[in-house]
Image: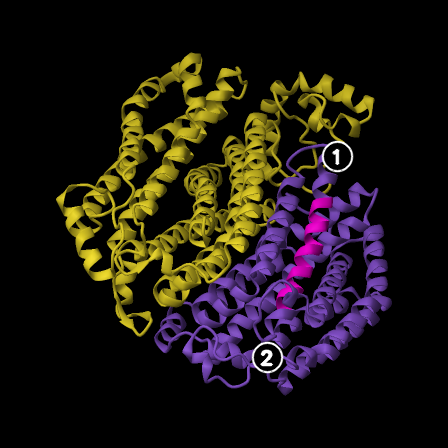
Chain colours: A purple, B yellow
Amino acid sequence: MEVVWLLVVGLLLAGWYALDGFSLGAGMFLAALKGDAGGRRRVVAAVGPFFLANEVWLIAFAGVLAVTFPDAEAVLFTALYPVIVLMVAAWLVRDMGMWFRARRPGTAWRRRWETTQAVASAAFAAFAGLFLGNAVREPGEGLLWLLHPYALVSALATTALFGLHGTAFVGLRATGDLRERATRTARRLAPLALVLAAALAATAPLAAAGTPQPAGIASPATASAPPAVGVTPLAVGLGLLVPVAVAVAWAAVRKGRDGVAFASTAVATGCLPLAAGALMAERLLAGVAGTTTIDQLTMVALPILPFLLAAQAALWWVNRHRLSDRTVTFF
Amino acid sequence: MDALGLARLEFGITTSLHFLFVALTLGLAPLILFLQTLWVVRGNPLHERLTKFWGQIYIVNYGLGIISGLLLEFQFGLNWSGLTHFAGELFGAPMAMETLYAFFVESTFLGLWIFGWGRLPKVVHLLTFYVVALAAIGSAYLIVVANGFLQHPVGYERAGDALRVVDIGAVFTNPAALLAVGHILPAALMVGGFFMAGVSAWHFRRGTAEVAFFRLSLRLGLTVGYVATFFTIGFGDASVLWVVRNQPTKLAGGAQAQEAAARMVAEHGPGDYLAPAWVPIALTLMLSVAYLYVLGALVPISLLGRGRIERRRLLLGVGVWTIPLPFLTVILGWTVREMGRQPWVIYDVLPTREAVSDVSATGVLASLVIFTSLYVALVVIGYTLIARIARAGPGTLVLGQVLGDPDDKTPHGAATGGEGADDRTGEESAAGGARSGACQESAAGRAPRRADGGNAAEPEPFREL
């Protein structure tokens, strides 16, 4: 059952990366649309229907992680305290940008919140990358510890990947001029994202190597745990899938195949947390909750998951069309 | 201040401000549900406009609730990992269930409701809001179950350095949770009802032309708020009686409290186990406000018939100026509940100081400063915007607007004075000024044409009347 919950936790985070990833990328893309208020309005309209349903994945991840892997969570949250604080702060600001933007008329007010949203989206993406990059390492202390080369590569790669994912999404939902601008930006971003994704996969051994095994963290359960970072074949596979998916997305963008491009960037972003999860699976499993918790939760919480997925699918179905004059707006 | 004090301060500030938004969300949802049901059943366009007007206030407030709630899920992991470790099974499980059963469902269906306007069949669209409202109540229930365990731990046993569930049924039917839900839901209806009535009163003071619109709002808000007051008091009193018997140190004073404190010293070591002395004073204050409504709200209610109240400017003014009162009172209520629990995080089981994470005071201070500033900005900007939308009245309905509608190139901001004037050409401003004078008549005239679902591409140009 522990493994099932590890998968659930992994899927919730992967869901957030693949879904809110494009909200964030589209948010960053707002900055590229200088002097095009109409274009920015359509970008927000493209993301709008999905916005609420995307960010809930990260809340669900945090809630489920805390109860299924409490000790692993405690270790992670203590070591990554500043990163999480800044990440949540960027998240608040991003949401303020989205929610406040259309609540007053006037382009000056809107431009201010669009800029806010763009900057906060980039920051949120970078902190999410920094979080994941450090999460796979042996827990350490201090601010400098957080600036490990691997974590920095992860931050950059996540930002670039989200940017690519967001432009692919706008390319998929928009029409005409805006679609072309998004595709053009995606074509420019793709090589950068590819290099960074490859660098992330290549530097993964850095995260594993050179960190001494600390003697038991937080709970006695982890003291007897096997080496925390094991580069398992699964992690290697998932890690390599990221650059491959980015390459596919690049090719699709060039051929104008919006659907394939978006699907590939979704796979690439979704694989980031899955690869990290596979890298640290043993450490997470060592910090798992007691069997009674797991059993109780399996009974009361697992049955809702199919309903949640169906609700999200319904949302996608209702909003499956490209933008048109009849697209409902709110944000 | 040490990490413990700072972490408590951060938790108090962020949850209190979050609850401001939660209370209005919980209170408005059933009222909007009622209005939309009326619309779907009777097909009266007035009810559609009511649903849209109160709905857009609801959504903006809901957004503020989300933003202020994001941190809370993380805060337990950041600052209170001792609690997660010690009682994850009992406290964390309802929290995790809340994210899945309530928040996830609520957000997804609210997205369907906002963006399904005019796209989904009317009945399906109404059903999505039923799910939203049910999920909101479910959310309140599950959060209070988690909190109820902290107030009155039941259904658990000790297993090493943690707690384990032995009776999940007891956890979910904890009287500390059920009494609180019974108290919080009508209290939220008081907040929502008197808010609706207060906003309507503002419009009557301004001599609104939307008489039928705000008459219904005023009647609905006052009636629901007034009836809810009695349930709030009933469950509140029941809670107090229950607390006196089960949490003797909470409303400190009396021999029973001293006895309990002495027993805690014997069992858990020396310390001050009595809650702060001002807690019972705060409780009295809360009760006084409730009784004030029992008595005071009778006056406007007796004048509801034939719209007599609509001309009483002083009385309407009282309705407007007392909008914040229920908000402040629910915060007071939470403060009584939470401060009264101190110095325990889990009453009589785990002291608060043992739940705080092993983090530096500097780290907590930094996060306290960052989040307090963000929350203050959120509350100030958020309420300014809500007030703006409320004042603008049903002339500017943004729910169900489509991309094809003109955006801010319309005379949208024409009546709002100088702001945004730089964005419009003089010609447009002039047109807006000329048209805003005619808007009161046209607003009424427009209504019947919107009966088909309201997505006609006509502009929604009018702001403040």
Name the spot of residue B305 as percent of width and height, x first: 35, 18
Find residue A278 and name its label: 2
**Residue under the point 59% across and 38% down:** B452
Q: Quadrant of the C terminus of chain A?
A: top right
Q: Which quadrant of the structure image shows residue B289?
A: top left
- Left or right: residue A105 compared with residue B47: right
The residue at the point 56 percent across, 27 percent down is B393
What number is the disc on residue A319? none
Nearer-N-terminus badge (1/2): 1
Looking at the picture, tell me which residue is in the foreground, A322 or B1.
Answer: B1
| Badge 1: chain ID | A
* Residue B154 falls in image quadrant: bottom left
- Residue drawn at (86%, 67%), measured in percent from left and top? A254
* Furthest residue toward left: B255
- Establish whether labels 1 and 2 are both on one chain: yes
- The reply to whether residue A95 is in sight is yes
Look at the image and say whether residue A116 sits in the magenta stretch: yes
Q: Position of residue A231 (x, y in %)?
A: 63, 84
User: How crowded is the residue under tag 2: few (<14 C-alpha within 10 Å), some, or many (20+)?
Assistant: many
Q: Is residue A302 visible?
A: no
Q: Which residue is mark 1?
A: A108
Name the amino acid, label 1: Ala
Q: Is B345 within the magenta?
A: no
Depth check, front residue: A258 or B189: B189
The residue range painted magenta reads A115-132
Q: Are marks 1 and 2 in contact (CB under 8 Å)?
A: no
Foreground: A14 or B328?
A: B328
Chain bearing mark 2: A
The residue carrying pointer 1 sits among few (fewer than 14), some (14 to 19) or many (20 or more) residues within 10 Å by Cα, namely some
Q: Nearer the viewer, mark 1 or mark 2?
A: 2
Label the magenta part by its dominant secondary structure.
helix
